[in-house]
């Protein structure tokens, strides 16, 4: 439940992310190997109450290994995970959840052919005893869901509406507000915007900020620096399982972030290839120019 | 050498395009929160009329009404159809499908099939008969042991499907053949090459068991007691599906098992429970059929598993799981009963009953697919 005194205390201490506050979740020099493959090497990051830590990296950078380590799917081979400053060994995702660490996976967050209220309480249904038998407390479930979704800025007028009829962004909102309601202090969001259009991505980023303003720590995993920069307080760049850079917002701007992430030379190379492919086609030319700009870090 | 580049820069350029808009989009969307919710209200208002017709069981109810009227209007079938004997006739067909359509429908909503459900109705009946004949035990003990056997079959199916992750269609097809073969083989071995098990010296408790399961009520032609079991099973199934935690898990297990697991739903246990449910349904049908005549035939129930599936699908259960209705499945069973019995009363060749069912099945599947697509369509 949300009434846990620990997060509230730290929220009051550090509404804007005071550096003295203890991080809610911290990874220290974490490494993970799969046989001879290095999935993660010496990765450190932290997330504090009321802050958003963005983990950026291209495909294969080790983002999903990092998520799985942080959410207790597997333990790190080296290094340690700390919750509220205390080292901890998760026995599994369930224990991580019990410590208030909730992971929202991009496509696997909701059941489309179930109503919003059923999805919201799935796995943690409120019940009402009727003699020896326990029934779903539908009235309470619907009321709580409405209130919690309203906090995210969504007005659900029909709780029986199928989640499948919601937009991609709203579905993410259901998953996020559900995690927050069930006591998540740290939200790990796995590529929440990657399948969404521009407008929907904006909506999801708004929910990220809303969760942050409720005093939660958010770890936003993404490959898009333009989604990360407006909402993030800290940025951790991953490449081939290693941390390429770790910055607070005042240490870096979005252009530098983009450049670092893609690797300036690689983008310039792509731009050249594109121009060679379609010098006459305006669309390709335009794309090539944009890439060249990204590569040069001028946006 | 030219590299096949276009595929790679495509997404890259798209995301940088998005980026420019997006940085501005965050404050924009905050302002748009009002209009968005307004649109939500309007959509709901338009839907209240159509919502009733979107319920999965409504189509089945309309079809049932239509079929009833066809035989009521037809001058050949009408007199018998509208008499008590007429009702007893099709209801006696329907309950056999109905008691099973409920657990089979629940299983289908949970994303699985059970092809061994039909033969298990016969196997449980035979088991009661053999135990009563060979050992002369109290009939209630025989019935209970048969129930234990059914639960074991359900657990076997469930564990096999959940642990091997094989399609339940294949796993239960195997169980179907095993049950069919052993029940025939066992009966012939014990019973001097006869496929019929008849209890000539009813053991203790038979009268009460017959009254509770296999009896009938009312003036002749009397209604079978089994109709109350059908009603009870339907209500139980409806309550479980829509009013309990397990019902929530059933929808989720069939709809999006990975999402369900991510939020802590015991998907495997739910599915195993559903297989035990169909097995117990088969046991109930077997018990009713055995106590009604104090005999059982070794191939009893073979082929009925398909009727159960037809009933569930006509009743609005989605073949791929995650959606459906217990009441609909029950109505589907009534439709099958009416179709099979009605053609006899109308003195049509009985094969027309099957053609009828085929058309209904097709119709049901199409309606389900449309409903599913409508529900899936995202507002953007």
Image: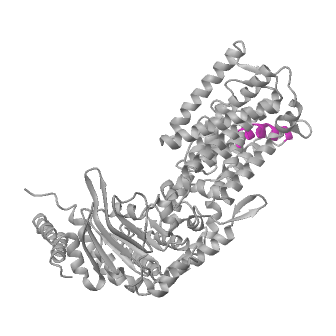
Percent position of residue B52, x then y: 65, 63
Identified at 9% across, 65% down, the residue is A276
Q: Nearer the viewer, residue B190 or A245?
A: A245
Identified at 70% across, 46% down, the residue is B67
Q: Nearer the viewer, residue A245 or A171?
A: A245
Left or right, residue A79 beside residue B334: left
Left or right, residue B324 beside residue A262: right
Does residue B121 appear in the picture of this structure? yes
Does residue B349 appear in the picture of this structure? no
B93 falls in the magenta region = yes
A167 falls in the magenta region = no
Quarter containing the N terminus of chain B: bottom left
Left or right, residue B230 beside residue B258: right
Q: How many marks?
A: 0
In which quarter of the view is residue B295 placed? top right
Whether A35 is drawn above or below B132: the answer is below
Percent position of residue B82, x then y: 82, 43
| Residue that lies at the very extreme toward the right in this rendered image | B219
Percent position of residue A282, x then y: 17, 72
Instruction: Give the prevailing secondary structure in the magenta stretch.
Output: helix
Q: Nearer the viewer, residue A206 or A74?
A: A74
Quarter containing the C terminus of chain B: bottom left
Percent position of residue A213, x then y: 46, 83
Whether A203 is drawn above or below B284: the answer is below
Please give the range of residues in magenta: B83-98
In which quarter of the view is residue B240 placed? bottom right
In which quarter of the view is residue A161 placed? bottom right
| Residue that lies at the very extreme toward the left in this rendered image | B1
């Amino acid at each position: 439940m949300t009434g846990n005194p620990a997060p509230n205390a730290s929220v009051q201490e550090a509404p804007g992310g005071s550096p003295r506050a203890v991080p809610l979740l911290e990874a220290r020099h974490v490494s993970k190997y799969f046989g001879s493959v290095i999935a993660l090497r010496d990765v450190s990051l932290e997330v504090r109450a009321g802050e958003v830590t963005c983990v950026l990296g291209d495909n294969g950078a080790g983002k999903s290994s990092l998520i799985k380590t942080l959410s207790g799917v597997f333990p790190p081979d080296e290094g340690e995970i700390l919750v509220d400053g205390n080292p901890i060994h998760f026995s599994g995702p369930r224990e991580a959840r019990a410590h208030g660490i909730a992971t929202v996976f991009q496509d696997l967050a909701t059941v489309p052919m179930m109503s919003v209220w059923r999805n919201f309480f799935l796995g943690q249904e409120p019940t009402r005893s009727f003699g020896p038998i326990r029934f779903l407390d539908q009235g309470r479930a619907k009321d709580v869901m409405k209130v919690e979704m309203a906090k995210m800025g969504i007005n659900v007028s029909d709780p029986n509406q199928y989640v499948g009829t919601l937009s991609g962004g709203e579905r993410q909102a259901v998953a996020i507000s559900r995690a927050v309601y069930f006591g998540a202090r740290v939200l790990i969001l796995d590529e929440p915007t990657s399948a969404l259009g521009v407008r929907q991505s904006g909506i999801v980023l708004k929910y990220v900020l809303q969760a942050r303003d409720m005093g939660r720590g958010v770890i936003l995993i993404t490959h898009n620096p333009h989604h990360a920069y407006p909402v993030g307080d800290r940025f951790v760049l991953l490449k081939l399982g290693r941390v390429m850079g770790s910055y607070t917002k005042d240490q870096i701007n979005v252009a530098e972030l983009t450049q670092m992430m893609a690797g300036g030379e690689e983008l310039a190379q792509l731009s050249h290839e594109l121009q060679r492919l379609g010098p006459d086609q305006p669309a390709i030319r335009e794309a090539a120019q944009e890439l060249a700009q990204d590569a040069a870090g001028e946006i | 050498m030219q590299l096949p580049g276009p595929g790679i820069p495509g997404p890259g350029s798209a995301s940088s395009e998005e980026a420019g808009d997006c940085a501005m989009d965050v404050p924009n969307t905050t302002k748009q929160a009002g209009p968005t919710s307004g649109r939500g209200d309007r959509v709901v208002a338009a839907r209240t009329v159509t919502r009733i017709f979107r319920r999965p069981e409504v189509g089945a109810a309309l079809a049932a009404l239509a079929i009833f009227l066809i035989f009521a209007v037809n001058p050949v079938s009408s007199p018998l159809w509208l008499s008590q004997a007429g009702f007893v006739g099709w209801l006696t067909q329907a309950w056999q499908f109905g008691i099973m359509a409920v657990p089979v429908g629940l299983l289908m909503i949970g994303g699985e099939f059970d092809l061994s459900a039909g033969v298990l109705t016969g196997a449980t009946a035979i088991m009661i008969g053999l135990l009563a004949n060979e050992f002369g035990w109290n009939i209630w003990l025989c019935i209970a042991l048969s129930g234990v056997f059914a639960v074991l079959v359900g657990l076997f199916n469930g564990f096999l499907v959940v642990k091997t992750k094989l399609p339940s269609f294949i796993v239960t097809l195997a169980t179907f053949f095993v049950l069919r073969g052993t029940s025939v083989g066992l009966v012939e071995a014990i019973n001097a090459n006869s496929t019929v098990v008849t209890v000539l010296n009813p053991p203790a408790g038979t009268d009460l068991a017959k009254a509770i399961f296999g009896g009938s009520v009312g003036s002749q032609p009397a209604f079978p007691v089994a109709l109350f079991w059908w009603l009870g099973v339907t209500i139980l199934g409806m309550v479980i599906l829509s009013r309990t935690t397990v019902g929530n898990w059933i929808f989720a297990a069939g709809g999006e098992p990975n999402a369900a697991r991510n939020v802590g739903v015991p998907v495997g246990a739910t599915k195993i429970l559903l297989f035990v449910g169909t097995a117990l349904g088969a046991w109930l049908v077997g018990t009713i059929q055995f106590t009604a005549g104090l005999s059982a035939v070794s191939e009893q129930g073979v082929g009925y598993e398909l009727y159960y599936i037809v009933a569930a699908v006509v009743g609005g259960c989605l073949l791929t799981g995650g959606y459906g209705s217990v009441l609909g499945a029950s109505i589907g069973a009534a439709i099958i009963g009416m179709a099979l019995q009605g053609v006899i009363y109308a003195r049509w060749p009985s094969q027309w009953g099957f053609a009828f069912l085929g058309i209904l099945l097709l119709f049901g599947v199409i309606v389900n697919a449309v409903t599913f697509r409508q529900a899936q369509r995202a507002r953007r």
